[in-house]
Image (tube, rainbow, N blue to C red):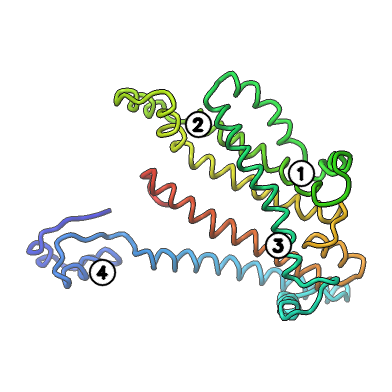
């Protein structure tokens, strides 16, 4: 909350406790008449980083506890966080993993996922916009999209094999089909769920037709569209790994998992899982979180 104070009045007050008092004292020392009591961007980022690190620490401790328990109870070596990180460091130094570097596996998986996801995002937004603009199209399109949404990702494997056989195209097809419904349905729901007051206010100002849709309804649906993109990303990322394990690709993080199973190289499997989680967390917690905050700021919504 931004506050305005007369400097003479502010100087006569006793410092308030906590953050507000510090902000007032700092403003007075700078001889400023206008100041903002909101936390600085650096402090906000530090707070978010601290929360994230605490969550990461809890996850690593739980992983270490499970590793120790399995070894004590079953006498089986269960790769610990340290074992996995050391193996990852060795692979990053250039050691081959099933005839390819870890970088080549990652790039291959990201290329497949990026192709399928971008196609799904583009077509899903277009389909959702058409459905949001027309109640008739929304009624027609919502049923098949719901059916697609209900189909588990692994259930697309036989369909992909029948249509495209083994290889890259089947993997991209599976990613596309699992990501598309979430994007299209969220876009349509966001547009149709725009507050009626937005329409009335825009109409009073003389806005109608395409301008109403693109300048009022679509921006009002932006958070819902972003939510659909996040859901589509998660769906596509999960099915990518499953597809690489089944449909006959010879390169990728999913391929590493299936090869590690046959060779009993559990450290390699854990490295693949760690990289998969790391990429997913980066996209979700960094890219999408930043995008969401900017959208909320543009919409004038209070930051969480």
Disc 1 to disc 3, how far (Cα)?
20 Å
Seen from the viewer's position, the closer of residues 56 and 226 is 226
Q: Are marks 2 and 1 in contact (CB under 8 Å)?
A: no
Question: Image height check: is 88 above or below 14?
Answer: below
Residue 276's disc is 3
Q: Are marks 2 and 3 in contact (CB under 8 Å)?
A: no
Q: Which mark is first along the chain, 3 or 2?
A: 2
Camera-side mark, 3 or 4: 3
The residue where tag 4 is placed is 22
Question: Image height check: is 281 above or below 162?
Answer: below
Q: Quadrant of residue 277?
A: bottom right
The residue where tag 2 is placed is 191
- Please give the name of the residue rendered at 25% of the width and 66% of the height, measured from the top-left corner: 23
Dot 2 falls on a residue whose secondary structure is helix
- Please give the name of the residue rendered at 70% of the width and 47% of the height, measured from the top-left corner: 116
Say few, some or many: other residues with alpha carbon within 10 Å of mark 2 (under 14 / 14 to 19 / 20 or more). many
Question: Image height check: is 301 above or below 289?
Answer: above
Q: Quadrant of residue 83?
A: bottom right
Q: Which mark is first along the chain, 4 or 3?
A: 4
x%, y% of residue 40?
A: 34, 64
Seen from the viewer's position, the closer of residues 139 and 24 is 139
Q: Which mark is first along the chain, 4 or 1?
A: 4
Residue 199's disc is none
Dot 3 falls on a residue whose secondary structure is helix
Disc 3 to disc 4, how far (Cα)?
43 Å
The residue where tag 1 is placed is 173
Q: Which mark is first along the chain, 3 or 1?
A: 1
């Amino acid at each position: 909350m931004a506050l305005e104070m007369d400097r003479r009045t502010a100087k006569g007050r006793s410092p308030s406790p906590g953050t507000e008092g510090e902000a007032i004292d700092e403003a007075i020392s700078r001889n400023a008449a206008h100041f903002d009591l909101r936390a600085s961007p650096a402090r906000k980022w530090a707070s978010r980083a601290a929360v994230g690190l605490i969550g990461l620490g809890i996850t690593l401790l739980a992983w270490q506890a499970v590793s120790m328990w399995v070894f004590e109870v079953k006498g089986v070596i269960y790769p610990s966080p340290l074992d996995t990180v050391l193996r990852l460091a060795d692979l990053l130094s250039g050691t081959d993993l099933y005839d390819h570097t870890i970088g080549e596996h990652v790039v291959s998986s990201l290329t497949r996922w990026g192709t399928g996801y971008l196609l799904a995002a583009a077509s899903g937004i277009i389909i959702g916009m058409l459905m949001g603009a027309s109640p008739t199209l929304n009624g027609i399109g919502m049923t098949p999209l719901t059916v697609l949404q209900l189909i588990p990702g692994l259930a697309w494997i036989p369909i992909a094999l029948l249509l495209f056989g083994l290889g890259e195209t089947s993997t991209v097809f599976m990613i596309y089909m699992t990501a598309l419904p979430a994007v299209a349905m969220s876009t349509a729901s966001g547009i149709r769920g725009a507050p009626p007051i937005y329409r009335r206010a825009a109409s009073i100002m003389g806005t109608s037709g395409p301008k109403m849709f693109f300048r009022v309804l679509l921006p009002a649906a932006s958070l819902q569209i972003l939510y659909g993109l996040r859901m589509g990303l998660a769906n596509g990322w999960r099915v990518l790994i499953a597809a690489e394990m089944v449909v006959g690709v010879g390169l990728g993080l999913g391929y590493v998992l299936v090869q590690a199973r046959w060779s009993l190289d559990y450290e390699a499997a854990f490295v693949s899982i760690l990289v998969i989680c790391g990429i997913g967390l980066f996209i979700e917690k960094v890219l999408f979180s930043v995008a969401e905050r900017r959208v909320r700021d543009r919409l004038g919504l209070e930051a969480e």
